[in-house]
Image (cartoon, grey):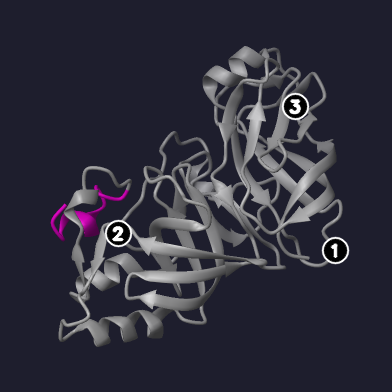
């Protein structure tokens, strides 16, 4: 079954003893570290959220709650639930309804104040892949084989370092708080505009910082064919620009086709020009590929 979920109930596993109150949890930053949205096979009772305590002290989650963006359903975490220092805590979810739209998950404290919130994530793959923070507790989300209840990146445990967007990578990733989608590219509107299907929804995505060549440009056809060859019919990931608000199912961001940064590749091939007006706005203006192309 594809798509995301509403939560109808939960079961809590694990946890160590501790003496710190919910206010402490908020100040030090318990993180949502991994999310299983669409497990292989039957979804009911098999979706889950992993919390992580990156600090050196135990943290007690008094009257904390998990909230989904879809209809704002709130599910309480039993009072006194504790996560030990450097430990993980898995919340198993029961499904009430499945939604194909991208959703985010928030952790609320006892006063219903948001402690942390994931980007809007979507998972159209019926497999054991999950959205994970890599390194653990960092800022970058990647879609990879699940590591339920254990480290996503063992080398990161005990380190306070976090990750930020880089120029290119062989691994899918999202950063920041914007929409994060993974699906199949079903259309190429222009060299820097694609259509991607996630579940039953189709999104139109314009690439951040780019400006397509004019149709009269001698390289226009080559640019269009390049995007088609790299992306059309493939699985792709969209990291929506945090600083550009989505308009319905129209997004702007970075697209990874076959694990390659399409924005960067088009610039390197001179198949797009820089939209300088976005340099002072875009989340991605400080990346190395944007800098070397004029931002």
* Residue occupying image coordinates x 56% and y 59%: 143
Q: Measure the C-alpha gap from mark 3 to mark 2.
A: 39 Å
Quadrant housing residue 123: bottom right
Q: Is the N terminus in the top left, top right, bottom left or bottom right quadrant?
A: bottom right
* Residue occupying image coordinates x 75% and y 50%: 5
Main SS category, magenta section: loop
In the rendered image, residue 152, in percent from the top left (x then y), is placed at 58, 50
Task: Identify the mark nearer the N-term, 3 or 1.
Answer: 3
Q: Which mark is residue 167?
A: 2
In the displayed structure, does residue 216 sit left or right of residue 231?
left
Q: Which of the pair 242/92 is nearer the observer?
A: 242
In the displayed structure, does residue 250 sit left or right of residue 284?
right
Q: Measure the C-alpha gap from mark 3 to mark 1.
A: 31 Å
Residue 293 shown in magenta: yes
Which-is-in-front pick, marks 3 and 1? 1
Q: Measure the C-alpha gap from mark 2 to mark 1.
A: 37 Å
Residue 151 shown in magenta: no
Q: 23 above or below 1?
A: above
* Element type where label 3 sits in the image: loop
Residue, disc 3 = 16
* Element type where label 1 sits in the image: loop
* Element type where label 2 sits in the image: loop
Quadrant housing residue 264: bottom left
* Residue occupying image coordinates x 32% and y 54%: 166
Task: Identify the mark nearer the N-term, 2 or 1.
Answer: 1
Q: Which residues are magenta?
A: 284-295
In the rendered image, residue 69, in percent from the top left (x then y), is placed at 66, 40
Quadrant housing residue 22: top right
């Amino acid at each position: 079954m594809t798509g995301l979920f509403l939560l109808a109930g939960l079961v809590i596993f694990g946890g160590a003893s501790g003496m710190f109150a919910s206010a402490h949890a908020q100040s030090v930053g318990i993180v949502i570290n991994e999310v299983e949205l669409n497990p292989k096979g039957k979804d009911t009772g098999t979706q889950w959220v992993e919390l992580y305590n990156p600090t050196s002290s135990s943290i007690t989650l008094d009257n904390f709650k998990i909230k989904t963006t879809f209809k704002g359903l709130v599910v309480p975490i039993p009072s006194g639930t504790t996560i030990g220092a450097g430990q993980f805590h898995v919340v198993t979810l029961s499904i009430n309804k499945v939604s194909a739209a991208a959703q985010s998950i928030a952790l609320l404290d006892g006063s219903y104040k948001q402690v942390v919130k994931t980007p809007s994530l979507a998972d159209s793959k019926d497999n054991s892949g999950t959205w994970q923070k890599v390194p653990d507790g960092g800022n970058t989300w990647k879609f990879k084989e699940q590591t339920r209840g254990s480290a996503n990146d063992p080398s990161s445990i005990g380190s306070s370092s976090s990750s930020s967007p880089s120029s290119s990578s062989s691994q899918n990733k999202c950063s920041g708080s914007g929409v994060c989608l993974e699906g199949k590219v079903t259309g190429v509107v222009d060299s820097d505009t694609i259509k991607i299907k996630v579940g039953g929804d189709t999104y139109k995505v314009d690439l951040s910082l780019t400006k397509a060549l004019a149709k009269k440009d001698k390289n226009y056809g080559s640019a269009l064919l390049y995007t088609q060859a790299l992306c059309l019919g493939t699985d792709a990931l969209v990291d929506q620009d945090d600083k550009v608000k989505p308009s319905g199912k129209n997004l702007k961001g970075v697209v990874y086709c076959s694990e390659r940064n399409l924005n960067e590749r088009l610039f390197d091939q001179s198949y797009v020009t820089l939209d300088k007006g976005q340099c002072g706005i875009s989340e991605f203006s400080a990346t190395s590929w944007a800098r070397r192309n004029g931002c």
